[in-house]
Image: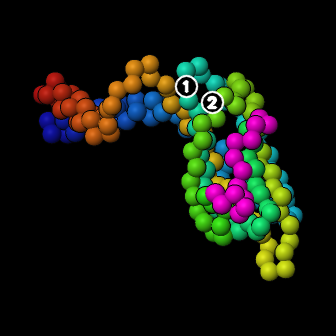
Amino acid sequence: MFQKNYKYLFNNLFFVFSVFLLISSVYSYSDYYKVNVDEKSKTETFNIDKVENYTYKLSYVHYGNLQEGMYVKIFVNGNNIHEYSKDLSNTGSGAYKKSENKTDITNYLVNGSNELKIESNIWKTENSSPYYVLENFEITEHEVSTIKLPISQNVNFFVFILCLICLIIRKG
């Protein structure tokens, strides 16, 4: 009898976690892009089935050691979504400064084939070999809610626990 309850609980937990995985999808495209003096640009083509009323966010980690006058630009389907440079003093432009970025790219994506391009203006200097790295690229999709309620993660966790308790009571 004890084993049946654990098996039932495991099956229900597996079902609930499977449902949560289906709610939020993640598309991961590449682990690592490095632009430097030798390779000034990188291009990645990917396919996506765009769903209406969903928001698509591009996230990645970026760092490098750009010098004065150098820049790195990120494009999605030809649209410039970010530019990093020491001159702009924006996040990630210093030496080895890691930063995460999450950008809404919904308006730039098309249903089907899309292109992600990293372009740089980097040259060799006397003191260093400048480079810039962008890694852990992923696109996440979120359904845009028609009703915006202030529901926190704690409430979601509480509802999850209540559902588990109801399933256990129903079985018992």
Q: Residue furthest bottom?
A: 127
The amino acid type found where label 2 is placed reads Thr
Please name the residue shown 77% across and 45% down the image.
Answer: 117
Locate the C terminus by quadrant: top left
Visible in this render: residue 11?
A: no
Q: Name the residue under label 1.
A: 54
Q: In this view, does 153 lie to the left or right of 59?
A: left
Please name the residue shown 66% across and 44% down the image.
Answer: 29
Q: Residue 106 carries which label?
A: 2
Residue 97 image position (x, y, % from top left): 60, 66
User: Badge 2: few (under 14), some or many (20 or more) residues near its Cα, within 10 Å?
Assistant: some
Residue 49 image position (x, y, % from top left): 65, 25
Q: Give the range drawn in magenta.
A: 77-90
Q: Give the answer, above or below, for where 38 lies relative to 11.
A: below
Which residue occupies the foreground of this view, 107 or 28?
107
Q: Give the answer, above or below, for where 102 lies relative to 92.
A: above
Element type where label 2 sits in the image = helix
Residue 169 image position (x, y, % from top left): 14, 28
Residue 166 located within the stretch drawn in magenta: no
Element type where label 1 sits in the image = strand
Residues under numbered marks 1 and 2 in contact, where contact means CB atoms less than 8 Å apart: yes
Q: How many marks?
A: 2
